Image (tube, grey):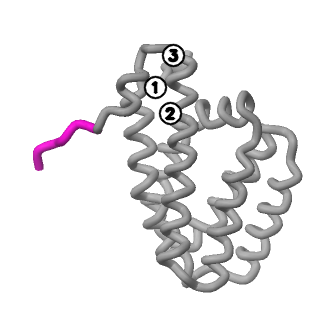
Amino acid sequence: MVKELTLAQLREAFDLRQMVEPLLMRAAVSRLSEAALKEAAELVERMAQERNAWTFSRLNSRFHQILYEAADMPLSMQILTMLQGYIQRMSFMQLSMMGFNRSSNEDHRLILDACRRGDADAAARHVADHVSGIKTVVMGLYAQLHGDTGADELHSKPPRHAN
């Protein structure tokens, strides 16, 4: 039996993704091959046509994997894989219950365009915005599914930690 994440754990996983993914993207941009960019573009087009949530999710994962692998940062990739594992169930439910997020694929186009231009800062910024948008939708879905058990926590600030 898989233990469900609390809202605080879900938020923490997304907050960490918002740190790791732009880091990977910024490092990857100058190292992306034409073949990787071509495959990423093909995946964006396939996602635009896809109607099956599971297939869309797999294509989405591959899109990000292609881009981030170029960073050659295996520890960061391992951390991201762990974080995605925590979030995957809720993200898939979002796709299944709420329909495909077409704006998410538009984010992919913006990310890819920045990569093609070699603009690492723009690519990282678009990735951060992309993760933030997904976080908003998934956290909202969590609050809906759990009624009031966490809705207040949804908008609360994360705890401050002493250094």
Residue 96: % across, % down: 74, 31
Residue 122 to residue 93: above or below: below
Magenta run includes residue 160: yes
Q: Quadrant of residue 116?
A: bottom right
Query: Residue at 51% of width from left, 78% of height from top?
Result: 120
Tag 2: amino acid = Met
Question: Which residue is label 2 attached to?
Answer: 139
Q: Residues within 10 Å of mark 1 (few under 14, many from 20)?
A: some
Depth check, front residue: 57 or 33: 57
Q: Which residue is mark 1?
A: 5
| Residue 4: percent from left, percent from top | 50, 21
Q: Position of residue 112 (x, y in %)?
A: 67, 72
Callout 2: few (<14), some (14-19), or many (20+) C-alpha neighbours within 10 Å? many
Q: Residue furthest left?
A: 162
Q: Name the amino acid type tagged 1.
A: Leu
Q: Position of residue 127 (x, y in %)?
A: 54, 62
Q: Which residue is nearer to you in this view: 21 or 133?
A: 133
Left or right, 118 with reference to 108: left
Tag 3 residue:
146
In the rendered image, residue 161 lying in the magenta stretch gets the answer yes
Q: Residue at x 84, y 62 (%)?
A: 45
Q: Tell me how far mark 1 sits from mark 3, CA to CA.
A: 12 Å
Q: Is residue 14 above or below residue 116?
A: above
Q: What residue appears at the point 16 percent right and 42 percent down from the top-left corner?
A: 161
- Kind of element beneath mark 2: helix
Q: Which residues are magenta?
A: 158-163
